[in-house]
Image (tube, helix red, strand yellow):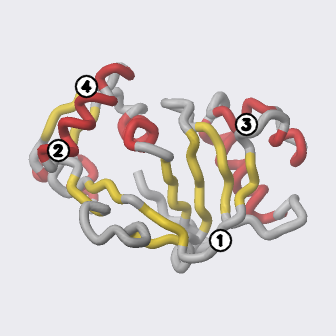
Amino acid sequence: MPRDDPDGRTVLYIGANLATSASEVFGEAGVAEVCPSFRVALLSPIRPLRFVDLAGEGSAMAIGALPMLGSGNVARRLSQDWARAIYEDQPLDHRADGVHYLSAYNNGPSLAVWDSQGKVRVGLPLVREGVDVPLDLPGMLVRLKEVLPVRGIPVRTINSSECRRCQQD
């Protein structure tokens, strides 16, 4: 669920593919309850972005962390504490826009982009359509039903009135 940061910081989590992104969104619940307001989008950077790589072999050790930090194999609170420390301390020789890591639920490549406004946009160069679509769009729903059940996450559609996230907004 979205949280408000007292300092006004934002984090945009991006998965390399639908399986990774959807597993991260629905993995903890164990079921993908897809309501009409859920969307998926292809994103592209507005400018070159730099990331602290936590997924590469030995890369987490460069900032004093164990490799399991970048593998999604640590408690969420610990990974968030590390991300906050990296954001605040900027331990490398360049200012990072976020971290590159492997997702906890799918082990797929993922990015956490800090304060993403002005860094990414919905869409891809030279692609005009189909880059921001509802998850319950028939073609997208078929794809979800292909990638999630094999990961132990059943998919079902629900109305906005049944959606806990929509009711909290």
Pick whichever of labels 2 and 4 is earlier in the sequence: 2
* Pointer 3 with pointer 1, Cβ within 8 A: no
Measured in 3D between alpha carbons, the distance from the residue under mark 3 to the one under mark 1, in whole angstroms, is: 25 Å
113 to the left or right of 92: left
Measured in 3D between alpha carbons, the distance from the residue under mark 4 to the one under mark 1, in whole angstroms, is: 37 Å
Q: Is residue 131 above or below residue 151?
A: below
Tag 3: Cα neighbours inside 10 Å, few (<14), some, or many (≥20)? many
Amino acid type, mark 1: Pro
Pick whichever of labels 2 and 3 is earlier in the sequence: 3
Measured in 3D between alpha carbons, the distance from the residue under mark 3 to the one under mark 4, in whole angstroms, is: 28 Å
What x and y, as percent, mark residue 96? 74, 65
37 to the left or right of 109: left
Tag 2: Cα neighbours inside 10 Å, few (<14), some, or many (≥20)? few
* Pointer 4 with pointer 1, Cβ within 8 A: no
Amino acid type, mark 4: Pro
For label 3, the SS is: helix
**Label 3: which residue?**
69
Instruction: Give the residue drawn at x 25%, y 37%.
Output: 143
**Label 2: which residue?**
139
Amino acid type, mark 2: Gly
What x and y, as percent, mark residue 2? 43, 57
Q: Is residue 163 above or below residue 68?
A: below
Pick whichever of labels 2 and 1 is earlier in the sequence: 1
**Label 4: which residue?**
154
Instruction: Give the residue drawn at x 70%, y 52%.
Output: 83
The residue nearer to you, when weighing 114 against 146, is 146
**Label 1: which residue?**
48
What x and y, as percent, mark residue 8? 57, 74
